[in-house]
């Protein structure tokens, strides 16, 4: 008789695609979202949604703001929509800064400031129409992009927090205006510079605020980031900067629903990878959690649904759904101390006591 030893191949589980690993999905109901901001933990806990990080999400065509607990998924209205008319008011980018909530007014062409109790502090009409899209804070000035205007609008932060509107214009040149969305996402970079993208051209530019001519310098060449929307910069424990750029199909042919990742070194941006997810459905703006572990985006469905959908004006019958998705952040190799040492640059600029809503004062 003979005896044998046999080796057989081990059946391997089907590999999870990158798109399905560590994905969190949140139901936002039937109201189209646009902007997202994650509040500091101590502030979020004041909203009555329990422990856990709280995200604020703007309603593009209704002007309201939803609050979502990123741990439990529970949500509530932070700011009820005034419901004056479909698309009026509108709300796009959103930031927490100096203890207040700042909202880019989208199609309303304005900016609004709220206390953490939801009471309006200031409403500043920029008088340019277009689509006021996103904002970035440098010192006591906040800079707004308008996707159909070839300049930035400025607002004095201290004045706005006092209920007054001191607006200005910062010129921008060195890029081509198109019929699509132009200047879109904007973030502070360094001590006195901004990074700004163009959705239509698919480029990211740097803007030195000491250069009063407003000449943009191309850091990521067109059309490498077609459909560019919201952006976030994180910095590692050894002061290396990494840029995340939401990209969506609104950029047209060649654009992909994704988040582009670039390492920054002065005026040089080096491509790292493109983060995709089966949960993405035209991601608009993005925000990183305080631990630097997940990046969150809202799916505005700019292309997979008509924008706006003819039925969207009646929320009692509109049957489409929108979501927010969180995906795990790939960690930079140079971040030797681990995920929790990533910090949002914007978080450094958003300190200060929480500001309760004051009675609105007349704009000046």
Image: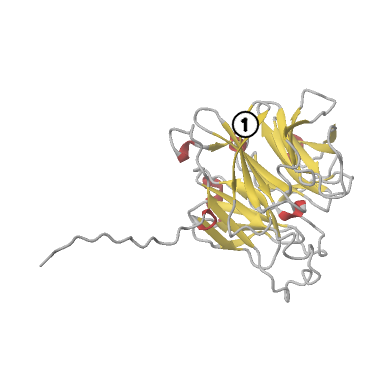
- In depth, the one of 284 and 50 nearer the eye is 284
In the image, taking residue 53 as reference, residue 66 lies left or right, namely right
Image coords of residue 113 (percent x, y): 73, 46
Tell me which residue sits at (68%, 68%) in the image: 30
Quadrant housing the N terminus? bottom left
Image quadrant in which you'd find residue 170: top right
Seen in the picture, residue 110 relative to 219 is either above or below; the reply is: below
Residue at the farthest left position:
1
Q: Percent position (x, y) of residue 52?
A: 49, 53
In the picture shown, does residue 84 fall above or below 146?
below
* Label 1, residues with CA under 10 Å away: few <14, some 14-19, many ≥20: some
User: Would you say 1 lies left or right of 263 here?
Assistant: left
Residue drawn 49% across the image and 55% down it: 21
Spot the residue most to the top. Answer: 210
**Residue 126 falls in which quadrant of the image?**
top right
Residue 53 in percent (x, y) is at: 52, 51
Residue beneath the point at 70% across and 31% down: 138
Residue nearer the viewer, 161 or 260: 260
**Residue 135 relative to residue 149: left or right:** left
Q: Position of residue 209 (x, y in %)?
A: 76, 27
Q: Is residue 144 above or below residue 75?
A: above
Q: Which residue is mark 1?
A: 264
Q: Residue furthest front?
A: 1
């Amino acid at each position: 008789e003979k005896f044998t030893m046999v080796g057989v191949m081990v059946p391997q589980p089907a590999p999870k695609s990158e798109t399905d690993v560590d994905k969190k999905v949140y139901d936002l109901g039937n109201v189209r979202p646009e902007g997202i901001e994650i509040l500091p933990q101590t502030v979020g806990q004041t909203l009555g949604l329990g422990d856990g990080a709280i995200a604020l999400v703007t309603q593009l065509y209704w002007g309201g703001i939803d609050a979502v607990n990123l741990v439990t998924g529970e949500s509530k209205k932070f700011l009820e929509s005034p419901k004056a008319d479909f698309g009026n008011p509108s709300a796009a980018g959103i930031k927490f800064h100096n203890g207040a909530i700042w909202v880019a007014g989208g199609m309303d062409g304005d900016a609004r400031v709220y206390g953490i109790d939801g009471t309006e502090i200031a409403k500043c009409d920029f008088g340019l129409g277009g689509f006021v899209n996103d904002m970035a804070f440098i010192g006591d000035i906040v800079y707004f992009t308008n996707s159909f205007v070839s300049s930035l609008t400025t607002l004095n932060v201290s004045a706005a927090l006092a209920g007054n509107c001191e607006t200005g214009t910062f010129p921008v040149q060195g890029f081509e205006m198109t019929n699509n969305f132009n200047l879109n996402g904007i973030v502070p970079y360094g001590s006195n510079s901004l990074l700004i993208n163009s959705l239509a051209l698919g480029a990211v530019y740097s803007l030195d605020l000491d250069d009063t001519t407003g000449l943009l310098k191309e850091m990521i060449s067109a059309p490498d980031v077609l459909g560019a929307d919201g952006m976030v910069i994180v910095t590692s424990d050894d002061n290396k900067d990494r840029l995340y750029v939401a990209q969506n199909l609104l950029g047209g042919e060649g654009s992909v629903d994704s988040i582009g990742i670039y390492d920054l070194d002065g005026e040089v941006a080096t491509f790292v990878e493109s983060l995709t997810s089966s949960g993405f459905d035209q991601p608009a703006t993005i925000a990183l959690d305080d631990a630097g572990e997940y990046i969150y985006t809202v799916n505005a469905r700019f292309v997979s649904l008509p924008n706006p959908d003819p039925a969207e004006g009646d929320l009692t019958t509109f049957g489409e759904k929108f979501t927010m998705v969180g995906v795990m952040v790939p960690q930079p190799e140079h971040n030797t101390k681990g995920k929790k040492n990533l910090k949002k640059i914007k978080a450094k600029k958003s300190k200060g006591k929480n500001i309760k809503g004051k009675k609105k004062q007349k704009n000046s």
